[in-house]
Amino acid sequence: MSTVTSDTPIAHGEHGHTSSFLKTYVFSLDHKIIGMQFLFSTLIWFSIGGLLALGIRWQLAYPWRPMPILGNLLAANEGGQIAPENYTMLVTMHATVMIFFVIIPILAGAFGNFLIPLMIGADDMAVPVLNMLSYWFMWPAFALIGGSFFVEGGAAQGGWTSYPPLSVIREAAPGSFNGQTLWLMGVTFVGISSMMGSINYMTTIIQMRAPGMTMFRLPMTIWGMFITAILQAFALPVLTAAGFMQLADRVLGTGFFLAEGAMANNSEMASGGGQPLLWQHLFWFYSHPAVYIMILPAMGMVSDILSTFARKPLFGYKPMVYSISGIAGLGFIVWGHHMFVSGMNPMLGMTFMVSTMMIALPSAIKTFNWLGTLWGGKIQYTTPMLFAISFVSMFIIGGLSGVFMAATPVDIFIHDTYYIVAHFHYVLFCGTAMAVFGGIYYWFPKMFGRMMNDSWGKVHFTLTFVLMNCVFYPMHILGMQGFPRRLADPYHYETFKNLLPLNMFISWCAFILVGIQIIFVINFFGSMFFGPRSGRNPWKANGLEWQAPSPPGHCNFDFQPIIYRGPYEYGSPETQEDYYPQTQPPWEATKS
Amino acid sequence: MNRFWSFLFLLVPIGGVACFVAAPYFNIWLPRDVSEHGRTIDSLFMFILYLTGAVFLVTEMVLFYFSWKYDANTNQEPVKFSHGSHALELVWTILPAVTLLFIAIYQMEAWAAAKMHPPVMDITCEVTGRQFNWDFRYPGPDNELYTEDDLVRTDGKLFLPVNEDVLLKITSADVLHSFFLPNLRIKQDVVPGMDQQMWFKSKKTGDFDIVCAELCGWGHYKMKGQVTFLPRPEYEAKLAAFGVEQNTMRVEVPEEE
Ligand code: HEM
Ligand SMILES: [Cu+2]
Ligand SMILES: [Cu+2]
């Protein structure tokens, strides 16, 4: 696009210049630029979400003590002291930012956009305009939810799950006064953005694969993205509809989620006639599949990285594909496991328990296959590989803790305690976020044509790995004692008094964990400008994306890619090299 | 530096087990259980802990061993060019499937007992959650709720008889709350517009925390109550005293539907 404008003589001069800049970097239709836009936006929100978490950790370590430095930002009016309503706002917004502004858009938006056309051999997405819109629809969401901090009553305080009536009755909480309305609208925009992305990804993957790129020659990253897109397409409409229903309850006075005569804190009586539990069903019907939306692409990326640096084919490619498909299918019938003690019919709880137990199975199969991939390889401990191996190690913990919560009688006790918090941080932070770091170190050369510093990468990895375990592992123990989540000051309960020292330890590890991420930031920006040039294929990897120039030009490939095999033929006896790119014709392979 | 990384991954199983072994010495564990059914829950927890603990140890040790043995710097053997194994896939599909199914079936009874078969008896007390307090309403001498002699307590203190089944009716007056008794292994969300029942039996006398476990607003953290289990005679004396107190104070009993 840009080349066309700059080639025409009229396009010279001041005006033409800015418009081509705008077209190239701002309203770009190029999937790589859009991917970068997603990447930078989500990384900025990642740091915001991290800072919000520090507020939570401060309060749990030093309840009601003014928070130094950051307190001036988070609680300026109270002199840095976190008021209880601000605490509930912090937990709500930390989760909202991390889930809707970081994990979901960084996987699908950033990596999905950047990698899908490159990995399948297309010159762009099927519908570039839709792709651009999917990024720009994030901005109303950023503005609405970012701005909600500054409206009367502050940002939403109903938890990221937004359970009514707390979230619907405006008087029930300060954040439900205005903040919740903005929250609902913001999340709806994220949903529209994801929906546009998912349609595009499905179409692109089905329609635009290069000659020879059969479905079973796709890398696992693409399979992860593909299944994720399907999940989004089927689950999102439910969340969007539920969001509009809650919005209607709030502003039009309907009563989908309010019982007859519901009121709180001297509010007016609602017309009612609805059911608070209905929201929970609708919300989790989306949000359980969404937890897989938040990990399947990461699993795919990890599979690719593991195979590359073990110099060995991925173990059990097809079982891997079948298990993520199984996860996707089962993912739609387990939502009730978030509602075991919600008041849902206990009979229903029983069936959800069985389906939840079953969904642990494909996760187990995947783990064994990752281990099988390492077996008998020649492991190169590069930074991305370390992150990928740690993903496997951490996912084992997150998957196993799921079994406790799936066991309904045990869940009676550990539901809404720190046990849950430990579980989902093991899958989302120690899992997905680590895969994202690994993915950035791995594909950075393709994105920017330069290498990231490997030694500093390893320092970053080691500190992150050790500290995050110090932060999240002890939370299992907290939960075991029944320590509830979302409580501003749990220590006035007899049962939880003795947990303060452990919480202080966790908090200090968390402060350092967030602090040392500066190593990554410096490495990232430093390498972008000063890193050594990488060339096309610095890792000697098979994947199609590594045959394109780094960074790839406007239409990605400077040749017509033709695919001869899957992406995991490392150490193949057919060739002398220890790798065998997907595009290398068999007759050109150097036989030993 | 050789094999350094594998030892870093070895820290996971070591630290992971150490954490659970050390916790009791710091007095952190499942809180004291005084209920009758709690033992089932606790032993199910411990059963899953040992089972998953074993799986955790084995898989993490395999991860360590592979990352130690197949380090490119030290491993001289050629790469095993293998795309997988049908036999292995079958083994590691069927084995966990059977185990998971077993856990699923094994726990059904405990769940049914806890949530599906209430004892046949009169309601002992009605519990109402409201921002940010637990209110209690005893049926009074006539054993019937919503009559003149009901005893209404709003001080967040619940008194129940020890060594007997109790049947509570629980609900909410405004938003969601959750009635959580850590020492009795009881948790039930209360939902406005929905009457639910819960039942349990305490084996010990004493005071125990009532915690609100579902986010209910800014004061969620202080929505604290206390349940006291008393022997039958003391319990009856306590309720009688409440009755006297209520009459002398001429507290009007709110009219009910
Ligand atoms: C091995 C398979 C898994 C099982 C059996 C499982 C089971 C469960 C159960 C039963 C709960 C509800 C617990 C409660 O609230 O009482 C839960 C919560 C959660 N799980 Fe998992 N899970 C698994 C894997 C995952 C994965 C892969 C992710 C994310 C990538 C994930 C993310 C979450 C999140 C975010 C929550 C908490 C939501 C909230 O209440 O805020 N889980 N899981
Ligand atoms: Cu779930
Ligand atoms: Cu509460």
Image (cartoon, grey):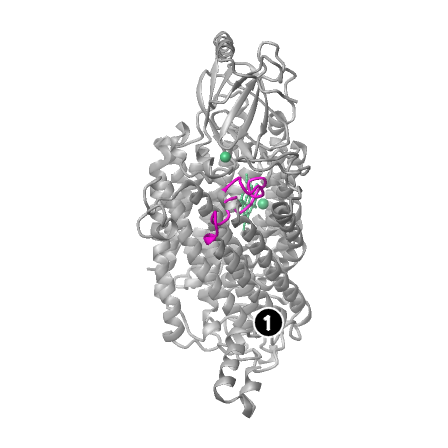
- Is residue A566 shown to the viewer in this render? no
Q: Position of residue B198 (x, y in %)?
A: 59, 24
Give A214 or A98, whichever is nearer the viewer: A98
- Whether the magenta-drawn stretch holds residue A324 is answered as no
Looking at the rendered structure, the secondary structure element under dot 1 is: helix
Q: Position of residue B66 (x, y in %)?
A: 45, 54
Q: Residue A461, relative to residue A247: is it above or below?
A: below
Quadrant of the image containing the N terminus of chain A: bottom right
Give A423 or A369, whichever is nearer the viewer: A423
- Is residue A472 shown to the viewer in this render? yes
Residue sitting at 51 percent across and 48 percent down?
A156
Give B193 or B21, whichever is nearer the viewer: B193
Magenta residues span A149-173
To which residue does mark 1 refer?
A117
Give B212 or A272, whichever is nearer the viewer: A272
The disc labelled 1 sits on which kind of residue?
Pro
Crowding at dot 1, Cα within 10 Å, few <14 / some 14-19 / many 20+, comes out as many
- Quadrant for ligand 1 reads top right
